[in-house]
Image (cartoon, rainbow, N blue to C red):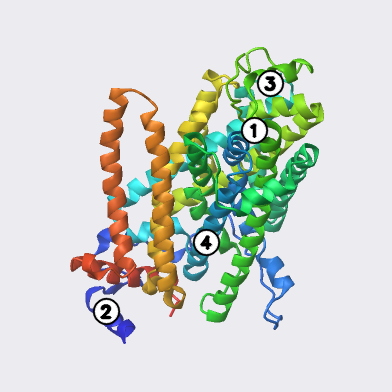
Amino acid sequence: MKAEQDEDLLEEDSPQENGAETNQYSSVSPPSSPVAQDEPFSTYFEDKVAIPDNVSQMFSFRKLWAFTGPGFLMSIAYLDPGNIESDLQSGAKAGYKLLWILLGATIIGLLLQRLAARLGVVTGMHLAEVCNRQYSTVPRVMLWVMVELAIIGSDMQEVIGCAIALNLLSVGRIPLWAGVLITITDTFVFLFLDKYGLRKLEAFFGFLITVMALSFGYEYVVAAPDQAELLKGMFIPYCAGCGSVQLEQAVGIVGAVIMPHNIYLHSALVKSRDIDRKNKNEVKEANKYYFIEATIALFISFLINVFVVAVFAEAFYGKTNNDMNQKCNETGLLPNDLFPRNNETLQVDIYKGGIVLGCIFGPAALYIWAIGILAAGQSSTMTGTYSGQFVMEGFLNLRWSRFARVLLTRSIAITPTLLVAIFQDVKHLTGMNDFLNVLQSMQLPFALIPILTFTSMKSIMNDFANGMVWKISGGIVILVVCAINMYFVVVYVTALHSVLLYVLAALLSLAYLCFVGYLAWHCLVALGVSCLDFGSRMQLSRHTDIYLLTDMDTDTG
């Protein structure tokens, strides 16, 4: 009955012109254009993977294999150099005590990725495209800028990670800036692998994940961590003897694992399968197999992260700078100024971690570590580029050639990275990584709030909209994650000890909170908090949701 009323309302207020719907609320919908209506919105995946249709059983490994791919590409964001550095610092600062935080953050990430995949499967559009049609111009542009900042921050960590790996493999002969240029070049080459078939591209990403598993798995076997302590740290949610350092590290783990641009990426990648969205059973089946695939992919990424935490917990927890200086001087691998000569707790990052692994376990451990970091950085750089493509195309509705799109998105992300590589020393990048982690933490609400908003709207998701349990639990999870990351931001800002920076941070925080409040208001209305619907908002959501459904797929009933 409500759907019929909505259709009647649409017919009265939104006359159709040349097959394109228009209405009086055009400010919250993209302008209709002949190009947009006549041509499907395409990105990389011109040829979709066919799904076997002659399988009748409830579960089929053939179908699971057909759906396998997007979840593993998504899981690479859980293995980027930023995550690896968070893992090694967690092990070095807290031993095995924060593994349960890593496990919980990965499970929360899986639930959020489930929402992203469902949005893409049910609507046939990814999150950036839905935001383009649901938000008015100013919020839409602001949202794009925020997500783009998150992508740039992540990309800087990934490209710098590749450059550090090349520096380690070449024993310092390849400087940081040269490693960045090499990474940029080979990323362009690898990005066009999908021209040889989407499955070949997915197989290449699978190969890189395998390299990471073997590399960090080797370090795990060599370090031989205490299995009982590892399991205790993973399943007992307690941190004995932990202080502010461990608390900040726990917050950093959540920020490193749950990345905003990955929500946009996953909602787009699921469009690569040939699914009849008019068939409810096919959509339901796709949601099921995508969730199974994402669970397997994130389980593998979790194991790889555990390898890194365990290695550094076993080898470096409780060690001091003098301990490392004494150990590494015996091998001759340690540069003179890498660690200060004092008894303070050891501070490690990706570069220093590789050096000290070589000191303790031999040169082979150093080179294998560098190979794993190179695979992590290269794969995450490629998926980061895909994220930039989808975000820019969706928010700005670009219709450029593919090469022009790749060139623009790469230039935006790479330019600041190259400047950092030229003017920064490879041995002193920890401060930059802390800043980039804060930057990405601040962007989380701009992915989590929209994904919960749109997947809770029955007019967008139809029978696949979030139920009451998912609405409440999703809202609580997003609130907790955002609160944790805001704490991380506050801790970072208060450590700057500058009045000018405090004033600047206060002004930016005011604008930031206003925008987050605007998105949260829309989300709460979508979740059913009717007391916040001030009359006109209900009309807006009703009209634009129907517009969105028709614009997404004219065949959708």
Mark pair 4, 2: CA separation: 37 Å
The amino acid type found where label 4 is placed reads Leu
Residue 404: % across, % down: 51, 42
Dot placed on the residue nearer the N-terminal end, 1 or 3: 1
Local packing at callout 1 (Cα closer than 10 Å; few below 14, some 14-19, many 20+) is many
Report the mark closest to the observer, 3 or 4.
3
Dot placed on the residue nearer the N-terminal end, 4 or 2: 2
Residue 11, labelled with which disc?
A: 2
Q: Residue at x 47, y 63 (%)?
A: 125
Residue 246: % across, % down: 52, 38
| Foreground residue among 36 and 112 | 112
Q: Which residue is mark 4?
A: 111
| Foreground residue among 63 and 227 | 227
The quadrant holding residue 167 is top right
Query: Taking 497 as reference, is 78 above or below it?
Result: below
Dot placed on the residue nearer the N-terminal end, 2 or 1: 2
The amino acid type found where label 3 is placed reads Asp
Q: Which residue is mark 3?
A: 323
| Foreground residue among 56 and 271 | 56
